Amino acid sequence: QVQLVESGGGLVQAGGSLRLSCVASGRSFSTSAMGWFRQAPGKEREFVAEIRWSGGSTSYKDSVKGRFTVSRDNAKNTVYLQMNSLKPEDTAIYYCAARGGVTGTYVFWGPGTQVTVSS
């Protein structure tokens, strides 16, 4: 059984920073990539960032490029999302996810952590 647990969310003023962490656990945990998604009230869940587990290549949603940085610590099965220059429109529940299974799609999800950016 794979479990993902996020932490680091909270309330911050516009222009501030937060760092999210996600720890993966489970004896059989193995993944090709981990990512961050978010869901704002009344909106669909959207992709934010991804990092490949081997090699560390990254990809980002256009609106967060230059402000967010995704990183990982393979030894700790942990992925991070450093969020700088936060804007009110970044307010959402942020979810950590890991690719897995035969199709390599995102199959493991954390419960989410709330990020609220005040103007």
Image (cartoon, rainbow, N blue to C red):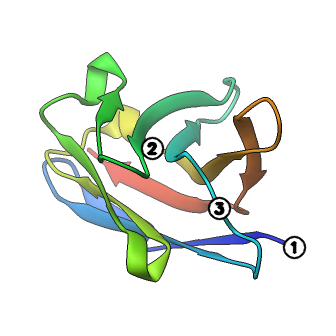
Mark 1 falls on what kind of element? loop
Amino acid type of the residue tagged 3 in the rendering: Ser
Res 1 label: 1
Res 81 label: none
Q: Does 109 sit left or right of 81 as displayed? A: right
Residue at 20% across, 28% down: 65
Question: Where in the figure is residue 103, as x and y percent of width and height?
Answer: 79, 29
Q: Nearer the viewer, residue 102 or 77?
A: 102
Residue farthest to the right, as pictured: 1
How many angstroms separate mark 2 from mark 1 (CA)?
30 Å
Q: Nearer the viewer, mark 2 or mark 1?
A: 1
Mark 2 falls on what kind of element? loop
Amino acid type of the residue tagged 2 in the rendering: Thr
Q: Which residue is mark 3?
A: 30
Q: Earlier in the sequence, mark 3 or mark 1?
A: 1
Q: Earlier in the sequence, mark 2 or mark 3?
A: 3
Residue farthest to the top, as pictured: 62
Q: Residues within 10 Å of mark 2 (few under 14, many from 20)?
A: many
Q: Nearer the viewer, residue 53 or 118?
A: 53
Quarter occupied by the C terminus:
top left
How many angstroms separate mark 3 from mark 1 (CA)?
11 Å
Q: Residues within 10 Å of mark 1 (few under 14, many from 20)?
A: few
How many angstroms separate mark 2 from mark 3 (CA)?
30 Å
Q: On screen, 78 above or below 40?
A: below
**How many tags in the picture?**
3
